[in-house]
Image (cartoon, helix red, strand yellow):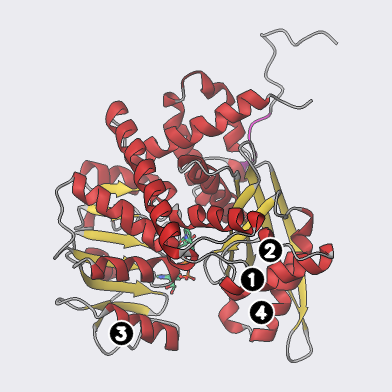
Amino acid sequence: MSPNPRSTPPLTHALPSYLQADNLGPWGIFLQQVDRVTPYLGPLARWVETLKRPKRALIVDVPIHLDDGTVAHFEGYRVHHNTSRGPGKGGVRFHQDVTLSEVMALSAWMSVKNAAVNVPYGGAKGGIRVDPLKLSRGELERMTRRYTSEIGILIGPSKDIPAPDVNTNEQVMAWMMDTYSMNQGTTATGVVTGKPIDLGGSLGRREATGRGVYTVGVEAAHHIGLKIEGARLAVQGFGNVGGIAAKLFAEAGARVVAVQDHGGSLYREAGLDVPALLAHVQESGSVAGFPGGEKIEDNAFWGVDCDILIPAALEQQITEANAGRITARLIIEGANGPTTPAADDILQDRNVLVVPDVIANAGGVTVSYFEWVQDFSSFFWTEDEINARLVKVMKEAFATVWQVAHENKVTLRTATFIVGCQRILRAREMRGLYP
Ligand code: NAD
């Protein structure tokens, strides 16, 4: 067959509507972010289309027996966005609003993040569209096991390694590890990270994302002359990421003046007692009803007088509607995708420094990488070793991103995308296309 003459239309068709950038779900936001980085990719830009299409996406039916004897069906997903640099890596989310578009975007942000901190992984993500708070422990276990079995064709210690995300934790990872191991007939601890310590988990993993948020936050604050001691902090999401980040900032002398979670919003001018609030959340599941703070309207949370804001809940929380009201000078994105591109522009015009998700919350996957390495070598490190290595990775990655932002006069988000996407596309180019 003769090659196509240049004048013929390209054989590649336009993307279907749900994959397009003006479809402003999380995936559309990711595509807009890719468009913003493309002018900075040089000759590698010829491969940029690779980033705009997930490598593979699996939708699975997850049927389980409920405790009352009836059968319920849930929809589950696992997406590999890109595996040019290594096996897929990314969390599993249980939430009633999970969609394929969301999981695609989360997997894509994992590709960029893993490359930005230079861990040898591609990007993946999974989820089930379910409100897990409405399930009993037995139902949760059956759903987790059936989901793990259904996505078994994609996961494996050298193929794709899930981890915790919203509403999943060490116990869920233990069930996933056990289910995969039963199906394989061998105990495969390296199939997931974020496991309990007794099952090959790593010291420091539970705190790692929050610690990473804190580490890059301190670096960024230093660059803009903002002192942590006495700084006023507002935190949205008081789970694994937000709770630990708040604790570390409070220990460094910051005042956590406002918090918000799915149950409501709290304010205390003198600063909330973070350890007491963490204990309250552990017991009751939410910040709501904590006696040491004043309840405020959820919408008022965004206008609270503060120096640092940490979104650590879900996507698309900082939008055109509230970006103009934010008083913080520094935003550190603990959550994935919390800021829309339009809000990014407003914040940039207002000189608010945004440390983007793809670097700010990379501490979790960094220690997940350490966990995976420890599982493979069956040799476990001390917590001090892990924290020291984590801080080193985060500081070096942030310094690189800061320099790239400065050289190209772009935001930290675009700079992180430059660093991450160049690494992914260089790998893509060197591997070449099969066949
Ligand atoms: P988590 O389940 O431990 O906590 C989630 C928090 O968000 C809870 O406090 C919950 O109440 C709150 N929340 C949920 N819906 C909300 C709403 N509508 N309004 C306000 N708050 C709401 O989850 P997590 O692991 O802390 O994850 C939080 C974010 O951090 C997610 O975007 C996740 O993708 C990201 N992240 C997590 C990790 C990790 O290691 N766990 C790593 C990187 C990024």
Residue 271: % across, % down? 19, 76
* Residue 297 drawn at (x, y percent): 28, 76
Give the labeled residue for mark 4. Answer: 140
The stretch of residues the image draws in magenta is: 13-17
Disc 4 on helix, strand or loop? helix
Q: Main secondary structure of the magenta part?
A: loop
**Residue that numbered label 1 is attached to:** 199
- Nearer the N terminus, badge 4 or badge 3? 4
Q: Residue at x 74, y 92 (%)?
A: 68
Contact between marks 2 and 1 (CB within 8 A): the answer is yes
State the mark number for residue 276. 3
Q: Earlier in the sequence, mark 1 or mark 3?
A: 1
Is residue 371 placed above or below 137 in the rendered structure?
A: above
Tell me the crowding category of disc 1: few under 14, some 14 to 19, or many 20 or more residues within 10 angstroms, Cα based.
some
Judge whether residue 320 can be spotted in this image.
no
**Alpha carbon distance from label 2 to label 3:** 34 Å
